[in-house]
Amino acid sequence: MTERIGLFADLHSNLEAFEACIARAEELGVTRMVFLGDLVGYNADPVAIIDRIAAFVESKKAIAILGNHDEAVFKDCHSQMNASANLAIEWTKSQLNNNHIEFLKNLPLIVQEEKICFAHASAHNPADWNYVTDSMSAWRCAQNSGKSYTFVGHAHEQALFYQSAVGKLIRFAPHPGDEIPVLHHRQWVGVVGSLGQPRDGNPEACFAVFEPESEALTFHRTPYDHFTAAEKVRCAGLPEELANRLITGK
């Protein structure tokens, strides 16, 4: 069976987006899933998200990575987040039991495979939560990864960085649904975008699918019931701006 890896980042407790993306990934024949951190935060379904991902991990169908919002559940990170994010984390803590918190505590910061590296923010000092947003940050990420392919989240917009003939990493804006050849003789850094809180003006959820054997990467956008997700945020008493962000996608 051809391996197809589903890449999901910044889920942020958004159950409606999660279910839509998993259903679409299964339609696309995904054989393994990688959750690139920030499973919780911002939105209203942290328990359901952790339960579902923990079941995938336990069944060996997925791996999951620690994100900064996940870390904030069990570590004081108030100074590193804005007021709305902090309020959402405090609310999230009140929803989780000890098993949920232990699951988050046990997530790795980075996972290295033969040709692939997975991290939430960057392979460069992953515990510092550096963003990959430009050529220099992508270059640092790729250098510290040492792999042909590095996949990250944290920055909520989709992007692909590829190594030029002189070694510089150049940013490319992928078009959803287009298969991109990613040949292993170059280094690539894929920022898969946010499943649970897109910020590029499009409310549709983000994910990507990587096919190692055919060396192909496809970014996807999936519509979901973002109005229901936003209403859940309001009903939970979370900041209104978090609900509005799901509706506007920015």
Image: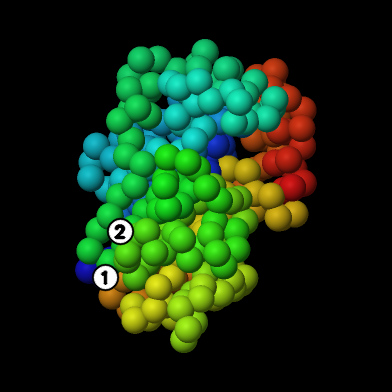
Q: What element carries label 2?
A: loop
- Towards the viewer: 161 or 230: 161
- Real-space CA distance between mark 2 and mark 1, rounded to the nearest whole angstrom: 8 Å
- From the viewer's side, name the closer residue of 176 and 72: 72
Classify residue 250 as left or right of residue 153. right
- Quarter of the view holding residue 184: bottom left
Front one among 188 and 57: 188
By what rule are the colours in the image chosen? rainbow
* Residue where numbered disc 1 is placed: 2
| Residue 242 vertical placement versus 248 (above, below) | above
Q: What residue type is labelled 2?
A: Thr
Mark 2 and mark 1 in contact? Answer it, CB < 8 Å.
Answer: yes
Mark number, residue 151: none
Residue 206 in sight here: no
| Residue 65: percent from left, percent from top | 37, 42
Quadrant (top left, top right, bottom left, bottom right) of the N terminus: bottom left
- Tell me the element at label 1: loop
Where in the figure is residue 143, as x and y percent of width and height? 39, 64
Residue at image x 50%, y 20%?
Answer: 76
Residue named by callout 2: 31
Estimate how packed mark 2 is, as few (under 14), some (14 to 19) or many (20 or more) residues with alpha carbons within 10 Å: some
Residue at figure coordinates x 73%, y 40% from the top left: 245
Q: Is residue 2 above or below residue 27?
A: below
Q: Position of residue 92 (x, y in %)?
A: 54, 21
Q: Looking at the picture, how far across and down is residue 103, in whole percent? A: 33, 27
Q: Is residue 245 left or right of residue 69?
A: right
Which is more N-terminal, label 1 or label 2? Answer: 1
Identity, as a three-letter code, of the amino acid under mark 1? Thr
Please tell me in which quadrant of the rendered image residue 27 appears.
bottom left
